[in-house]
Amino acid sequence: MTRSPTTVQRFYAALARLIRPYRWDFSVGLLATAAASGLAVLIPLTFRGGVDSIVRHGTSAPLLLYGLAVILLTISKGWGEYLAYRCIAGMGQRVAYDLRNRIFSHLQSLPPAFFDRANTGDIMSRATSDVEGVRMFINWSLSSFLEMMFLFIAALVLMSLMSWQLTLLASAMFPILGYAVMRFRRRLRPRYLAVQEQYGRMTTALQENLAGLRLLQAYRREETETARFREINQELFRRAMAAAWERAIYLPTIFCLGTATGGVILWFGGSLVMAGSLTLGEFVAFIGYVGLLTRPLTTLGWMISLAQRAVASLGRIEEILSTTPPPTVVAQAAVSAPAPAESVREQPIVVFQEVDFAYNGRPVLRGINFEGRKGELVAITGPSGAGKSTIGHLIPRLYDVSAGHVLLQGVDVRDLALQEVRRRVAVVPQETFLFSASVAENLAYGRPDSPPDVVHRIAHEVCLWESIQSFPHGVATLVGERGITLSGGQKQRVALGRALLYGGEVLVLDDPFSNVDAETEERLLETVRSAARERLVLLITHRIKTLQAADRILVVADGGIVAEGTHQQLLAQGGLYRQLYERQCLRESLA
């Protein structure tokens, strides 16, 4: 029966994978650390020779020679430590660089369902604070552990050659130290993990408040949100202090053990010198070695705290990196959708066959069947929460069906390469998102190599050019984070232009005219109708004029299609569509 690896074993296995590409830097750093440690242990030997020379030869002792030797050894040791730190620290920076890139690249491959469950602030914390925790361990704790290992081996060997009795006495503290270290490690790791988790919650709260600052100010929630953030920050402070208290208890314990050992060595070593079993120079060298060993021992608590933080941090990072996309989301390279034929009016571009979809076990769509052809403008309407937007999400595989099939050009989208599907489908989501870039860059986001005249033409087609002319730098004007400097209608027109410029055989528009006036809506409908000549347009909307312009309307309610037809046909049938129509007419008349 095989035992599963422990947390520490998994940490070192993951760390080895991160370091492997930089094994040359690690090897040079290891050799430089060994050389610096070797030179460090020669310095007390040099003092031993100088002191014994004074005892034997008095004023004729070659003190200048010994002094120059100490200086040369110290300088050489400094260069060795410089080279070791440069290699190890450089490796730490490269590992952090790789980790950040891996996390970001991996996040791009995860399906939207992952982000529905994940916390943005927590993800940001793992990509920043946790990566920094791993880097600090490599830069400081790992190099210090290597130095301490070499120093202990070399110093203990030389100390044993001078006096095995005194070495045995000095080594008596190691079992006590080992017990203290193990106890400290077991107690500190869960505390650092708790700190990192709470740091993620604080980052989430900060990110949400900054994103919704205007809303909370409009609702006069500043004091409430400040109080909530203070509570989260207070809990972070409490957890951080709990970890700090553990370190505060541990460090004096190590210092006391080191000091007590020095006192015992002074008593027993002095007795050996007076008995003639140990020369004065050897006693001075021995004290020097104890000092060499005491320095890494006093920082052992700090090194272990860095290691414990790194164990927690790398574990949290691995949780993200080990979250693999489900098999249906991994792009297959073998199947491609057939190229569209010249005359495909009779051939459906998109087909839904008995499609069911459930979100976290909750049914959203049931038994959806419809077809869409090139040249059609198909509108989808229905009550809020009926599943209209979900239909649009299934075509570009933002989500995958629970049952049934979604066909693109006659091929199930799950059998197509993911990039192929999304190359053929352009989407305008219900929630408009713009990047903190220029208007032109947002319009050309899907086609960044588009020439300026094409971008300008699209801006004209989506009724944005007049607004652009009033901007301080025209299409080069920065729109701010999430397009904050633009109105809701302007953002929607940029999003529509972005999708039109992107191209594809299918255009999915989710409530794209909700923030534009009636006149602009009519002009945009003309643009959409023109775009529908060369593709299938699925338009999710409640607006009457948009529904009237559609070739066909699907009425969705309770997760299923309850009616289908033209505007006039559905009105004549009565039922839900007529109720929605009359309700919308009343709402528009009151407006």
Image: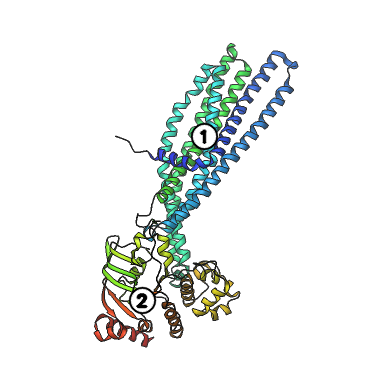
Q: Which residue is mark 2?
A: 345
Amino acid type assigned to the residue bearing label 2 in the image: Arg
Q: Position of residue 75 (x, y in %)?
A: 68, 32
User: Up-down: is 229 above or below 505?
Assistant: above
Give the image quarter of residue 564: bottom left
In the picture provided, is 332 more to the left or to the right than 26?
left
Badge 2 marks a residue whose secondary structure is loop
Image location of residue 381, percent across then percent down = 32, 77
Amino acid, disc 1: Phe
Vertical relation: 420 (above or below) 257: below
Q: Secondary structure at mark 1?
A: helix
Residue at x 58% of width, y 32% of height: 31
| Residue sitting at the far bottom | 589
Q: Which mark is residue 319?
A: none
Q: Which mark is residue 145?
A: 1
Give residue 72's position: percent from left, percent from top: 69, 29
